Amino acid sequence: MYSDQDLQNAAEAGVFKHEQVDAFKEWVNKPQENTDLNIADEEQFRLVSGFNDIFVVIACVLTIIAVSMIGQQVDEVVGGLAAAGLAWGLGEYFINKRHMALPAIVLMFAFVVSIFYAGAELISHKHYSIVLACGLSIIASYGHWLRFRVPITVAALAAAGVGLLISLAIAIAPGIEEWLHVLTFVLGLAVFIFAMYWDSQDLKRVTRKSDVAFWLHLLASPLLVHSVFQFIEVGDYQGISLLQAALVLVTYGILAFISLAVDRRALMVSALAYVIYAFSSLLSDFGIVSLNYALTILVVGGSLLLLSVYWHNVRNKVVGVLPEAVRLNLIPSTS
């Protein structure tokens, strides 16, 4: 057996092309297509291959922080740029040479965040400094993607774009803050559609495109969920009515249906805090104060456990009711 590391090393040495490696992985996974537990349903992604990954991350973070602090003695912008330069340099070795997943994620974030910090310090205007920082972060993320192809970088680029549009809207029209949940919903929907585009490029989830979609779904979910529950006015710590509780239940049901259809769990996870808060508050209003959180967490946790066990069966039924045109762009259901 050859490991993913061996295949990547062979591709880097020119023995294979990266496209051939992806095609080989896809071919290897073909025999699993008709098993009860389709690998695509598991949302697998590689994060840590060993404790050395964690060791490298700790060393990189400490070194980058130290360089940033030294640079800040000259100027805040210098500190940010120095940290970004070091993160890029470390990436040349740990990402391009060693192909280490966790250090790749951390070094990407260190690079983009450092550029954001430096951009925010360039001008003193409260709103436009964030606009500039987000704009520079978009450029930094795109450059990092072109060089290193770390899947989470696309989500970082999308996050910077969302930040740019929101900060620009606030800078131009300060009164828009009351409608931010609407703008957030629209931007979250755009990111979700972008994630579905990447998902549709790899329906068997064996290439890097699926990893890109995974991180984009993680970004889109809180944007969508938070704005939706803002419409329902849940989470303001002022109690909850029966109507609001019913709306929370219906909303979570819709989110669960979408999650099952697209075979991504991020939407359901993002909404958990709102569901737990809503129903624990409702139980408290009915006098069940001492056990309100415990009972809510027990019911929610038990329901999620059952769903995790029967995910494939439930998903088969959900996908079965969808139009064929929609099913063709989704992960195939298991037989």
Image (tube, grey):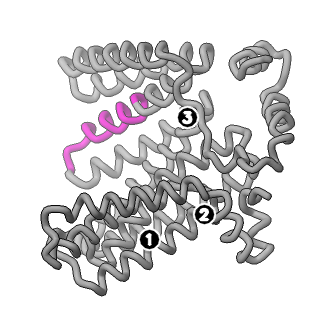
Mark linked to residue 252: 1
Tell me the element at label 3.
helix
Relative image position of residue 163 (x, y in whole percent): 38, 54
Residue at image location 69% in from the left, 18% down from the top: 5
Query: Which residue lies under the disc numbered 2?
Result: 260
Residue range highlighted in magenta: 110-125
Residue type highlighted by circle 3: Gly
Magenta includes 112? yes
163 to the left or right of 283: right
209 to the left or right of 246: right
Task: Identify the mark nearer the N-term, 2 or 3.
Answer: 3
Query: Which residue lies under the disc numbered 3?
Result: 143
| Dot 2 crowding, Cα within 10 Å, few <14, some 14–19, many 20+ | many
What secondary structure characterizes most of the magenta part?
helix
Magenta includes 188? no
Which one is in front, 136 or 329? 329
Which one is in front, 166 or 263? 263
Q: Nearer the viewer, mark 1 or mark 3?
A: 1
**Residue 95 appears in which quarter of the rendering?**
top right
Residue at image location 78% in from the left, 13% down from the top: 13
Task: Identify the mark nearer the N-term, 1 or 3.
Answer: 3
| Dot 3 crowding, Cα within 10 Å, few <14, some 14–19, many 20+ | some
Task: Identify the mark nearer the N-term, 1 or 2.
Answer: 1
107 to the left or right of 94: left
**Residue 123 appears in which quarter of the rendering?**
top left
- Marks 1 and 3, Cα distance to the nearest angstrom? 38 Å
Residue type highlighted by circle 2: Leu
Relative image position of residue 183 (x, y in whole percent): 39, 70
Picture quarter with the C terminus: bottom right
Picture quarter with the N terminus: top right
> Hey, which residue is sitting farthest bottom in the picture?
243
